[in-house]
Amino acid sequence: MKLLSQKEALVQSALKNVPGLQLIEGFLSPEECNAFIISLEEYRKSYEIPLIYRPERKRSLKYRVINGEDIQKRLPTIQKLYESILPTVQGVTNQNIVPLKNRVVGVNINFTPPGGAYRWHYDRNAVTAVLYLNEVDGGEIEAYPDYRFLLKGARSSRLQGYVDRLLRFGIFLRLGRKCVIAPKSGRLVIMRGDRCLHSVRTVSSSRDRICIVMSFDFADAVFSQELALDSYLYSSQRYIAKSDPNYSSR
Ligand SMILES: O=C(O)CCC(=O)C(=O)O
Ligand SMILES: [Fe+2]
């Protein structure tokens, strides 16, 4: 394992009480994580998992993903986990959130291959829980919780896109609180994903980083960019539009 720098070790140990981002260690035991990993290895023998690659100037999106519809059909134990984790996530966040109506997005399994990463973004939904299934070198979530200037009633607007991009510049990032969360089996990260700027650092191990991503939102939530963002995140075909699919092109 790579040794953490002293500064990063401090960042990690101070993470327990950050508003907008919580860690639960050992949410699953190593044996439970292994059982999931074995069932996913079996899954991969029967089904192709698409590789999504969207190059970006800084950190690109490069990962494989099993979407929620396929999980519901073929991986019932993971679907059950998504349903049974709800009270924990509601309790930790103190928010009356529910699983997403969009089944493709609700629960995903992300496989970040060696050299893969996940670009900087905010989530479309209010709360996201990431459950790490294994430990790899690199692949840390780098996050700035509670770090967004949200435009009321216009969160999918082009203007919101400009504001969000502005906040990624170093001079602004210094105003935020940086959290670095290394992947470790059974570790659960719960964040207010629509207010937390986050990304996944490049995986430097020779094996995939594997995690389960579970999304929740308020019952009345709507997201206007649903179709564009879904094809960007889940289809291995080239993404045609040039602009960021999180925001409207008008
Ligand atoms: O793979 C991860 O750890 C998180 C990815 C993520 O941020 C997301 O799926 O929205
Ligand atoms: Fe995310």
Image (cartoon, rainbow, N blue to C red):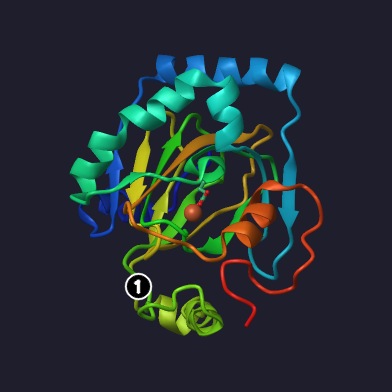
Residue 27, how many percent across, how many down? 31, 29
Per the image, label 1 sits on a secondary structure element best described as: loop
Look at mark 1 in the image and give the residue it sits on. Answer: 176
- Reply above or below: 176 against 51: below
In this view, 143 is above or below 136: below
**Does the closest atom of ligand 2 sit within 8 Å of the Cβ of label 1?**
no
Total marks shown come to: 1
Q: Position of residue 86 (x, y in %)?
A: 29, 36
Quadrant of residue 63 within the rendered picture = top right
Amino acid type assigned to the residue bearing label 1 in the image = Gly
Which corner quadrant holds the C terminus? bottom right
* Residue 188 in view (yes/no): yes
The percent position of residue 9, horizontal first and vertical second, equals 36, 50
Residue 217, how many percent across, how many down?
A: 36, 52
> Which sits in the foreground, 121 or 86?
86
Can the viewer see residue 186?
Answer: no
Tell me if residue 169 comes above or below residue 13 in the rendering.
below
